[in-house]
Image (tube, helix red, strand yellow):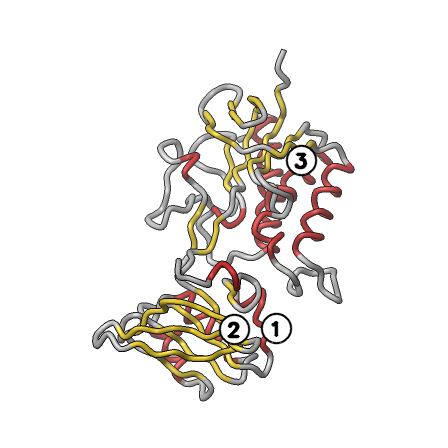
């Protein structure tokens, strides 16, 4: 007979392993289903300095492995397999993967979100080596240097503000001539003396230039092509939540995220949304881990018949 777990976790990032850790310590039988490796997007970060408890920082891959071992120490199981489809309303929940079918009484969806890429030549080659997608994560590598931010929404303005306090010079590149971000944030950015704006410009390519990054730009109005040299490029054009698996089963907000509240409950009893896939104001390792703890708590309540 197939094993029926108390909890299945889809996604082995900080939110997923936090949920698993809290759940197994509470006596639940838990399986974590992860497609690639523990840590999720965090595993791609070369240096994490904003997660409490590591005074010298830690690389994301090692932090992910530590989280996996911590949860497995108390009995969590990890299965490296791609989830192909899931039935959230089935009793128990049914999860079909490349490694077989799993059944669980509760499900924590922690599949995360990935940054939207520019999709231009040279971008992949510079990933984490001059091209970044999180100013809070990687901005400190550019203390006293010259950086560029690509985007025009709230995330781009917020990243530019963060970088203006670290870098010597920040240039915000936007394809239009006005920013879409909240006015109060735009006003704060405009007041920074070390911030410049490059309007009506699209990044068309990236290439190496003597240990720096050459950014090819095309003016969207005149078609004029120019090139600028910088130490680092921060792409802030939004994120893509990994919600395709649950589309049609769970409600999504206009941006494609799962609108679960701070309890992480979704509209389907026994299903919880955790980490970057959830509608929330701040998406960081520490907030994903907090979501996981909340999900484990409310999963226990559900299993005890209190939900």
Against 275, residue 212 (above or below) is below
C-alpha distance separating marks 1 and 3: 36 Å
Q: Percent x, y for residue 100?
A: 57, 22
Residue that badge 2 annotates: 232
Few, some or many residues within 10 Å of mark 1 (<14, 14–19, 20+): some
Comes first in the chain, label 1 or label 3: 3
Q: Is residue 81 left or right of residue 177?
A: right
Residue at image point 55% right, 36% down: 10
Few, some or many residues within 10 Å of mark 2 (<14, 14–19, 20+): many
In depth, the one of 225 and 96 nearer the eye is 225
Few, some or many residues within 10 Å of mark 3 (<14, 14–19, 20+): many
Against 36, residue 8 (above or below) is above
Residue at image point 67% right, 35% down: 23
Quick check: marks 2 and 1 in contact, CB under 8 Å?
yes
Residue at image point 57% right, 63% down: 128
In depth, the one of 275 and 168 nearer the eye is 168
Q: Is residue 290 left or right of residue 88?
A: right
- Label 1 SS: helix
C-alpha distance separating marks 2 and 1: 9 Å
Q: Percent x, y for residue 179?
A: 31, 72
Residue that badge 1 annotates: 141
Nearer mark to the viewer, of 2 and 1: 2
Quick check: marks 1 and 3 in contact, CB under 8 Å?
no
Q: Percent x, y for residue 170?
A: 47, 80
In depth, the one of 91 and 146 nearer the eye is 146
Against 40, residue 123 (above or below) is below
Residue that badge 3 annotates: 23
- Label 3 SS: helix
Which of the numbered marks, if any, corresponds to residue 41?
none
């Amino acid at each position: 007979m197939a094993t029926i777990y108390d909890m299945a976790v889809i996604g082995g990032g900080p939110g997923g392993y936090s949920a698993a850790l809290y759940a197994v310590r509470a006596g639940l039988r838990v399986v974590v289903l992860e497609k690639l490796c523990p840590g999720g997007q965090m595993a791609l970060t070369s240096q994490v300095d904003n997660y409490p408890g590591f005074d010298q920082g830690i690389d994301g891959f090692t932090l992910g492995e530590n989280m996996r071992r911590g949860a497995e120490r108390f009995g969590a199981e990890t299965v490296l397999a791609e989830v192909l489809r899931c039935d959230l309303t089935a009793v128990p929940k049914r999860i079909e993967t490349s490694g077989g079918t799993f059944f669980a009484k509760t499900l924590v969806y922690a599949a995360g979100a990935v940054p939207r890429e520019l999709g231009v030549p040279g971008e992949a080659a510079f990933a984490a080596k001059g091209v970044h997608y999180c100013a809070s994560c990687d901005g400190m590598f550019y203390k006293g240097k010259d950086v560029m931010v690509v985007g025009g929404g709230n995330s781009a303005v917020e990243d530019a503000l963060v970088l203006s306090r670290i870098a010597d010079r920040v240039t915000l590149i936007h394809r239009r001539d006005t920013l879409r971000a909240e006015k109060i944030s735009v006003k704060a950015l405009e007041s920074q003396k070390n911030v410049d704006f490059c309007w009506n410009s699209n990044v068309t390519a990236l290439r190496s230039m003597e240990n720096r990054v050459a950014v090819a730009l095309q003016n969207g109005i005149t078609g004029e092509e120019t090139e600028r040299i910088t130490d680092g490029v921060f792409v802030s054009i939004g994120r893509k939540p990994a919600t395709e698996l649950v589309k049609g089963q769970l409600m999504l907000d206009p941006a494609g995220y799962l609108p679960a509240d701070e309890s992480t409950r979704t509209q389907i009893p026994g299903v919880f949304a955790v980490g970057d896939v959830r509608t929330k104001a701040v998406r960081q390792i520490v907030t994903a881990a907090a979501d996981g703890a909340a999900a484990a708590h409310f999963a226990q309540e559900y299993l005890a018949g209190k939900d």
